[in-house]
Amino acid sequence: MTNTIPTKKLNHRIKRSRGDVVFDVINITIILLITLIMIYPMWYVLIVSFASPEEAVRGNLYFWPKSFTLEAYGKVFAEKKIWIGYLNTIIYTLSHTVYSLVLTILPAYALSKKKLPGRVAITWYFFATMFISGGLIPSYMLNKSLGLINTRWIMILGMGVGYSNLVITRTYYQTSIPGEVYESAYIDGATEWQTFIRIALPLSGAIVAVMALYAAVGTWGSWYTAFIYITDQKKWPLQLRLRQILILDSTQSLDVQNMTLEDQMEMQHQAFLVTTMKYAIIFIACLPMLVLYPFVQKHFVKGVMIGSVKG
Amino acid sequence: MNTASTLTPHAKQPSYSARLRETRKLMGRYWQLYLMVLPPIVTTFIWHYIPLYGVLIAFKDFDSNLGILGSPWYGLNHFLWFIQRPSFYQILLNTIRISLYSFATFPCSIIFALMINELTSKKLKKTVQMISYMPHFISTVVVCAMVHMFFNASTGIVNKAIVALGGEAVEFLYRTDMFDHLYVWSGVWQGLGWGTIIYLANLANVSPDLIEAARIDGATRWDIIIHVNIPTILPTIVIMLILRVGGILGVGFEKVFLLQTQRNISASRVISTYVYELTLGAGGSTIYWDTSAAIGLFNSLVNLVLIILTNTLARRLSEVTLW
């Protein structure tokens, strides 16, 4: 230390003791290990989907495939059922997202007005839904009497509003948009609706994005509703098809039976191929989320943060 | 809008009729806001409150020809039937065991958040967060499919590794003693990182001055975690705890059902899957609709009682409550 300037800087910081170094080493090691466990299953899906079926099933494939083939993807791309499911899911996701956005943003804005008479009662009306629900059969009976069974509507309609999302959005309006912003509009004699459209909505980009993403991710991954209510396979969303192919082990649905079997080896190859196809299907099913993830992650985190303001 | 009298300190409380007038005036001014709240009130009424009315069949000998009101009363017989079933204890025990086991992993996210918070390198912190949030975005079906495939006896990587290390392949999904572990730890894998967000947000609010002062006083990093960081996130922990306890008997249908196989069913049959089995499942029948409503109601009530109890307890202990 010949130079005196850095020492000055160092004085300001607290010296790292040996205990600190040990602490850091242990902490970082454990965190890296956990991170590895987080990412490895996803990595493994990726490498198996590109490996040759023989290596994937018989070989010692752990980190990097020796072989590379697009055979599994080729077969999956020819699988109409998956793409029908994909298309259905896209339709359901878009429609349900719009539906639930309308049912969340509008009431949240209204409930953010502290002077609104009945505000507490209305909030409780939604809050109570968190704790007690009708359950499977009463809901089934209702949807049956509404004629929604085996229709696409069952995937789009519904409550459309969740209490926590309502509170997050309401909190956003109360904390992020200062009341004075609305004043000029009121002075101009604007109605509540006009104020919302002209002033609040243009300022709600962030929260609309968060809510849209929550709804979209939820619908994209949902299979339960379809599982209970939709028997017509043409209307199945992707996730229900995935369950059939990946979990019920329904190889028939992959049309392996119709492949020409030249000899024993070929048959084995086809059987192995079914395994790598499953991994390829997983990758294809997760692709939209993985592509969007880096861009949307921030919004999701923001949603959790706004939610935690209320606590 | 305010009259002079209401602003003076000795003014009387506005009379009832005056307040009523004020409320009416506000309601008149805000009618468009009510219109904005109306659609979700209607949809919530239809899809949430009407099924609550349907729960009445839990006390009826339900006949769909007679309707909910027309069916004869059946008292508590459906509850008694369920309690007297030979499988009742098994189902209840499975439900409680799986819940408690998942509940026991509740501190994982807290610990992980405290650890991430200690990372000094911003870049590393960002990367760890980015990667650990990712599993949250994978759908339940895919996560369960991954469990099925990774733990497959012949093609799964876990068993391949076990065999390579000299062990014997295990049929994880056929074993009743493995179900809990698969269910709980796949859940931890998916939710660990995501669960840290709320705590990390709280930890970011800890004042650096406070930490520096503690350091100068000779506190180790461990001391700071115990005496500064944990007390900071404690209110959030309590809230999360109440929410978790409320769901303790609400073992979700989806993941249990997706990990269930014919062979592990004696360990994986929980209340929600049993309700499905009785009614809409392959062997189910409409005869059991009323019974299953009773079972569902039983489940809901236990949850409700649990959440009220925890909330009361939390109010006594820490003054942090849900309501």
Image (cartoon, rainbow, N blue to C red):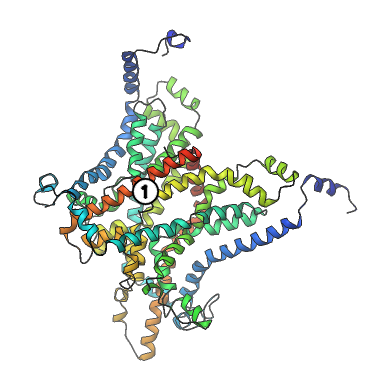
Q: Quadrant of residue A286?
A: bottom left
Is residue B72 toward the left or the right of residue B54 in the image? left
Looking at this view, name the residue that lies furthest to the bottom: A263
Residue depicted at 70% across the width and 50% down the height: B220
Image quarter hosting the N terminus of chain A? bottom right
- In the rendered image, residue A117, in percent from the top left (x then y), is placed at 35, 25
| Residue B266 seen | yes
Q: Quadrant of residue A101?
A: top left
Is residue A43 toward the left or the right of residue A193 in the image? right
- In the rendered image, residue A111, in percent from the top left (x then y), is placed at 39, 32
Please name the amino acid that badge 1 sits on: Thr
The crowd level at tag 1 (other Cα within 10 Å; few <14, some 14-19, many 20+) is many
Q: Is residue A232 above or below residue B156?
A: above
Q: Is residue A4 above or below residue B42?
A: below
Label 1 residue SS: helix
How many numbered marks are there? 1
Residue depicted at 14% across the width and 47% down the height: B68
Which residue is denoted by mark 1 in the rendering?
Answer: A97
- In the rendered image, residue B39, in percent from the top left (x then y), is placed at 29, 38
Q: Is residue B62 above or below residue B12?
A: below
